[in-house]
Amino acid sequence: MSIHYRLEGRSGAPVVVLSNSLGTTLAMWQPQMETLLKHYRVLRYDTHGHGQTAKNDKVTLPQLAENVISVMDDAGVRQAHFCGISMGGLTGLWLARFAPERFLTVTVANSAAKIGEQSGWLSRARSVRSEGMSGVASGAASRWFTEDFARRNKTVVDPLIEKLCAIDPEGYAACCEALAAADLRADIAAITLPVLFIAGRLDPITPVADSEFMQSQIPGSHILVVNASHLANIEAAPEFTAALINFTQQHEAVYER
């Protein structure tokens, strides 16, 4: 499987891996890039079936996580900080639990140990396979952002919707099926890495209670609630970026490259 990624920044700097949400591409992290590149090398990638990354017929959460390891290996990155949002956050939880030796910290944004209900994801997968991406795209702005933000920031929101429309329905559907089966609620208490949860106060998809549950299960983890909906890295970009940098810098270590 060919995974599209970009590694940017000063050689020798610590690395942050960024993992996108369902229905987006690595471009969703653009609000963080200028500031992150002052401190880190940034490794971002298009997840399975999104953007320029190829798709398989079926995919699971462990496979999504193993893709991260494959990208790191290909880029020559031994250890890194990780930040993922929504599906990317759930991917980060799996990595924190089952591949902790590769990471220094994990930041899980707008996510949950189990996102939504199985029936809803399977229904969405069937829908996009039969009808394409238009139905999902038509309601995306209201799921991703508060009404006020979407109205005031069309130049930000509209390109994201265009990218969503361009995603291969089969790749999107396969990720829906992976989310339908993914449930780490019984596993996360064993996580020992430093973990930061970022939740959107107005997030209808992964509400604050989901982050509070995860934080209660993982000893020493932290939670930050920002005034945003589901794509908090965009709607509350300055606060999100500052929190990520502050958290990772608290846990700097010797990097193996």
Image: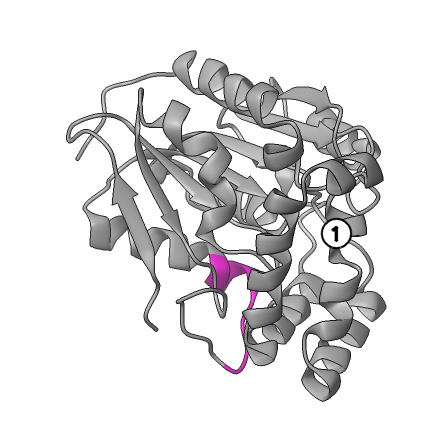
Q: In the displayed structure, would residue 25 be above or below residue 49? A: above
Residue sitting nearer the eye, 187 or 224:
224
Q: In the displayed structure, would residue 133 be above or below residue 255? A: below
Q: Quadrant of residue 156?
A: top right
Callout 1: SS: helix
Residue sitting nearer the eye, 181 or 71:
71
Disc 1 marks which amino acid?
Ala
Q: Which residue is found at the position 73% from the left and 32% from the top?
A: 211
Quadrant where the image shows the N terminus: bottom left
Q: Residue 173: x percent and y percent?
A: 64, 74
Q: Which residue is mark 1?
A: 141
**Which residue range is magenta in the image?**
57-64
Q: In the displayed structure, would residue 112 be above or below residue 242? A: below
Q: Quadrant of residue 197?
A: top right
Q: Residue 60: x percent and y percent?
A: 56, 67
Q: Quadrant of residue 109?
A: top right
Q: Residue 81: x percent and y percent?
A: 39, 31
Quadrant where the image shows the C terminus: top left
User: Does 124 sit left or right of 245 as displayed?
Assistant: right
Q: How many marks?
A: 1
Spot the residue most to the bottom.
130
Q: Is residue 216 magenta?
A: no
Q: Which residue is found at the position 60% from the left and 36% from the top?
A: 234
Q: Is residue 62 magenta?
A: yes
How many neighbours does mark 1 have within 10 angstroms: few (below 14), some (14-19), or many (20 or more)? many
User: Does 100 sit left or right of 156 as displayed?
Assistant: left
Q: Residue 221: x percent and y percent?
A: 61, 21
Q: Which residue is found at the position 55% from the left and 74% from the top?
A: 171
